[in-house]
Amino acid sequence: MKNRQQLTDEIKALQEQLDAMPEVGINYKPKYGEEFFYIDGLGKVNSYIWRNGWMEDAYYAPGNCYPTEVMALQIVHNRKTLVKLREFAFVPDFNNRNQEKHHFDIHKGALSWTNIAVADSESPVYFETDKLRYDAREAVGEAAIVDMLEGGLV
């Protein structure tokens, strides 16, 4: 069994590791002198050093700062998936109870789908028929859709 001092030292070391980790949220803001990643207008991931200038603000304001290249690349992948899905999608009328509104969902870590009548499920895309939803899944791939729904688009 560890004594009090050993546990205190371990907690201190873990806290230092935690403090060194970047804070990640909806809108990640790097610290001065820290490298961050952003997505340019062509969908390419680049890096930059945060200097508290107007250029950095231009990346930060729309939520285009990421602590790692991997995170930024995942967002690019998710956005491309969404663009492909939108080729099959439509804008539903949630006041129309008779209109079919098919969408994808994640249930217990796996892709599922449903047809809703009234409520907005916060799905990024809806399909007018089950066939269009099926065609979209076939064209885009189930794994890419799961990644997008789990990983987000910001």
Image: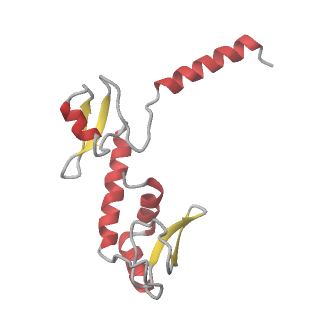
Q: Residue, x 23% and y 52% (percent of image)? A: 43
- Residue extending furthest toward the bottom: 98
Q: Residue, x 36% and y 58% (percent of image)? A: 78
Q: In which quarter of the image is residue 141?
A: bottom left
- Residue extending furthest toward the front: 95
**Percent from the top left, x then y, of residue 87?**
29, 74
Report the side of 89 relative to 20 (left or right): left
Q: Residue, x 24% and y 35% (percent of image)? A: 57
**Percent from the top left, x then y, of residue 67?**
37, 36
Q: In this view, does 153 lie above or below 49?
A: below
Q: In this view, does 71 lie above or below 20?
A: below
Q: Which coloring applies here?
A: secondary structure
Which quadrant, please, contains the N terminus?
top right
The residue nearer to you, when weighing 104 against 2, is 104
Report the side of 32 relative to 124 (left or right): left
Figure label count: 0
The residue nearer to you, when weighing 143 against 16, is 16
Q: Residue, x 32% and y 58% (percent of image)? A: 79
**Percent from the top left, x then y, of residue 30?**
34, 31
The residue nearer to you, when weighing 3 against 114, is 114
- Residue extending furthest toward the top: 5
**Percent from the top left, x then y, of residue 112?**
53, 71
Q: Quadrant of residue 10?
A: top right
Q: Quadrant of residue 107?
A: bottom right
